[in-house]
Amino acid sequence: MKTVTERVAALSREKQALLLQGLKQKANQPLNSTIRPRSSSLDSWIVRFQPNEQARLRLFCFPYAGGGASIYRQWAKFLSPDIEVCGVQPPGREYRMNEAAYKRMPLLLEPLTDAITPYLDRPFAFYGHSMGALISFALARHLRETQQKLPVRLYLAAYRAAHLPNPNIKIYHLPSEVFKVVLRADGISEMVLQNEELMQAMLPTLRADFELCDTYEFQEESPLECPLVVYGGLEDVRVSPSDLEAWRIHSGKEHNLAMFPGGHFFLHSEQDRLLASLAQDLEQYLHSAT
């Protein structure tokens, strides 16, 4: 499976032009971080790739910075038919590219909670990758407080434990050339980085996503009463095994850590292994629930 930027790089010039047209419209609409972006419908937040009203469990999947719900489009093929895979689509990407992305976690959680609540009528689990891990953890806490609900499993991948300080400098406000250096280190295609027009259109969402993570303020709360399953990449230069192991304090239940070959985006390079692990764990839950 290709990353979002690889798919963009592979587009024809005509399709890149269409993408740019939509991105420019969004990029030219500045948003103060204290103003809440508006969506035409709460349904735009949740993508049900294969709606299944008979599913016994819903797995909500949260994207990494700059990514969208389509990252998880194929996952349903690898999981039990008892599981409905739902992608979470924040503003600023894919079909929501004309909406401004959120820059502060509290502002994101309120509309996301409103959107996801109607789908919590059965057991549910969260998978979040990188930025998505932080959002899913914060949402689980918020749901506990506001809805008295928790996921039956919380899968957190490629992100340091939420209470740990960011060891890196904040880059979201830096000049574009410096920001692109970090993106290059993350494996963003050189073809995309060298396309100045495309980068100018994509940078607002990428900057907002980095700002969302870099400005997150951790608050002490009691551990979540649900199991945490934490995943990491053995070659990830951003997140160390000790960063991942530190998630342990946030669960009052069990905590498991699994490492895969690959770097920060091992969900693409090691998709089969990752989904095999997810499938086994979720099937164990469904069996025990029966």
Image (spheres, grey):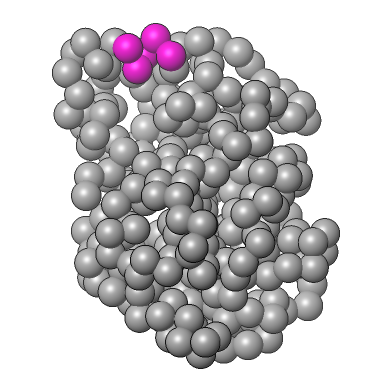
Q: Position of residue 152 (x, y in %)?
A: 59, 75
Residue located at (63% from left, 79% from top):
226
Magenta includes 31?
no
Q: Residue furthest front?
A: 54
How many labels were placed on the picture? 0
User: Magenta segment, principal secondary structure?
Assistant: helix
Q: Position of residue 196 (x, y in %)?
A: 32, 16
Residue 271 can be seen in this image: yes
80 sits to left or right of 214: left
148 sits to left or right of 283: right
Residue 249 can be seen in this image: no
Where does the magenta region start and end?
18-22
Task: State whether residue 156 is above or below residue 128.
Answer: below
Task: State whether residue 230 is above or below residue 39.
Answer: below
Q: Nearer the viewer, residue 14 or 249?
A: 14
Q: Residue furthest right?
A: 146
Task: State whether residue 149 is above or below residue 228.
Answer: above
Residue located at (62% from left, 66% from top):
122
Residue 85 lies in what quarter of the image?
bottom left
Residue located at (55% from left, 10% from top):
28
212 sits to left or right of 199: right
Residue located at (37% from left, 66% from top):
81
Q: Position of residue 128 (x, y in %)?
A: 49, 59
Residue 193 lies in what quarter of the image?
top left
25 sits to left or right of 224: left
Task: State whether residue 163 is above or below residue 134.
Answer: below
Q: Position of residue 145 (x, y in %)?
A: 82, 64
Q: Nearer the viewer, residue 272 or 197?
A: 272
